[in-house]
Each structure stands twice: as structure tokens, then as C-alpha cells.
Image (cartoon, rainbow, N blue to C red):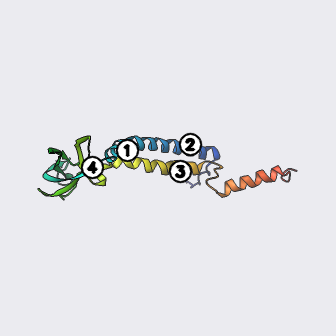
Amino acid sequence: MTTNVDPAPPTPARTMSIAQFMIFFGIVLLILGLVISIRPLGHVLGSRVTLGRVIGVDEYEFNNPAVYRYWVPIVEYEVDGKRHKFKGVVGRKWTEYSLGDRVEVIYQPRHPEWGRLNLFEEIWPWYAILFPIGVVVTTVGLFLLPGSRARGGIASKRKREVEIWDADGLGTS
């Protein structure tokens, strides 16, 4: 016969180690998010926008072509009389681009050959989400610290009341 026993409540040492882990992990995510976001940020700062034209659509197939088939546009644009071409970064499960479609292209004046579609998901890759996740994980870790004033919880408030009571000499016999 097995009995269900409730696990023991977390001890302060256990809560501290969980909080420390979350803070450490959150800071790692923050740093990774910042490092990864430097390149897209550099691409956006001081950039210019021009119009390009879709000259083709490239199809990608993964393991099962019926399920994993994506299309990316091939775009041509002109800067200072010189033509440049690039492939979109983010694939779509449907072709939303047709040959000849006009699209906005963002590029750096110093490196006009590094063009991208002027779309959020093309400029900021999916892993840029690491920074906001790091902020959340670090914040939760700080709230979990035992006695954290940021928590404003009952336990930390009671602890302060007991400290005040003992400081007055009223709590000792």
C-alpha cells in the first residue's frame, strides 16, 4: 500500500539555491540576448530603405516535403546605380510573394550589398527573444530570494516584525 505524502515545504537553503540558479541562468540569457542582438541592431542603426523587386522564390524542403516546405523570396534592388541581390531569411509555408512584387529593402549605406526585407522577423531573428526571457527569469529569481524586500511577502514582513520585537527586548524572556 502506498501513501501519498506531501513533499516538505522548501527550506530557505533550497529556495536560495533555486533563486541563485534562476538569477545565474537569467543573467546568462541576458548576456546571450545582448550579444546576439548587436548585429541586427547595427544593421538597423543608420540604415536606409529602398524599394526592391521580387525576381524569384526559392523553395526549401525538409524531411517530409508535404509538411516541411518553405519559400523565401529572392529580391533585387538598386543603390547608386549598382544592382544587388539577396534571399530572404525567414521562410514562409505559403508563397506570399509573386514575381515582380515591390518590397521594402533595408540596407546600410556603407554596405549596400547587405540588404534585408524591411520586416521585423527578417531583421530580428527568433533568438533575440533570449533577452526578454532573461529579464523575466532574473526577476523571478530575485523575487524568490529569501527575505527579499522586492517580494514584499508575508514571510519577509513577519521576519522584520520579529527582528523589531527582539530589538525592543520584548521578545526575550
In front: label 4 or label 2: 4
Q: Amino acid at mark 2?
A: Gln
Counting residues from the start of the chain, the first of labels 3 and 1 encountered is 1
Q: Are marks 3 and 2 in contact (CB under 8 Å)?
A: no
Q: Which sits earlier in the primary sequence, circle 3 or circle 2?
A: 2
Q: Which mark is residue 139?
A: 3
Q: Secondary structure at mark 3?
A: helix
Disc with the residue nearer the chain's start (1 vs 4): 1
Q: Position of residue 7 (x, y in %)?
A: 59, 52
Q: CA distance from mark 4 to mark 3?
A: 37 Å
Q: CA distance from mark 1 to mark 4?
A: 19 Å
In this figure, which residue is indicated by the disc labeled 4? 48
Residue 20, numbered circle: 2
Instruction: Kindly indicate whether the residue at mark 1 contacts the one at mark 3 (C-beta within 8 angstroms).
Output: no
> Nearer the viewer's eye, disc 3 or disc 1?
1
Q: Amino acid at mark 3?
A: Thr
Residue, x 19% and y 58% (percent of image)? 94
Q: For mark 1, what is the residue?
A: 37
Residue pictured at 40% horizontal, 40% vertical: 35
Q: Camera-side residue: 142 or 54?
A: 54
**Residue type indicated by callout 4:** Arg
Work out whether mark 4 precedes mark 3 in sequence or the reverse, and give the earlier one.
4
Using the rendered view, name the quadrant where residue 51 is placed: bottom left
Mark 3 or 2: the one toward you = 3
Q: 6 left or right of 27?
A: right
Residue 156 rendering spot, x and y as whole percentages: 68, 53
Q: Nearer the viewer, mark 4 or mark 3?
A: 4
- Report how far apart the C-alphas of labels 1 and 2 lie in the structure: 25 Å
Q: Residues within 10 Å of mark 4 (few under 14, many from 20)?
A: some
The residue drawn where x is 17% and y is 57% is 102
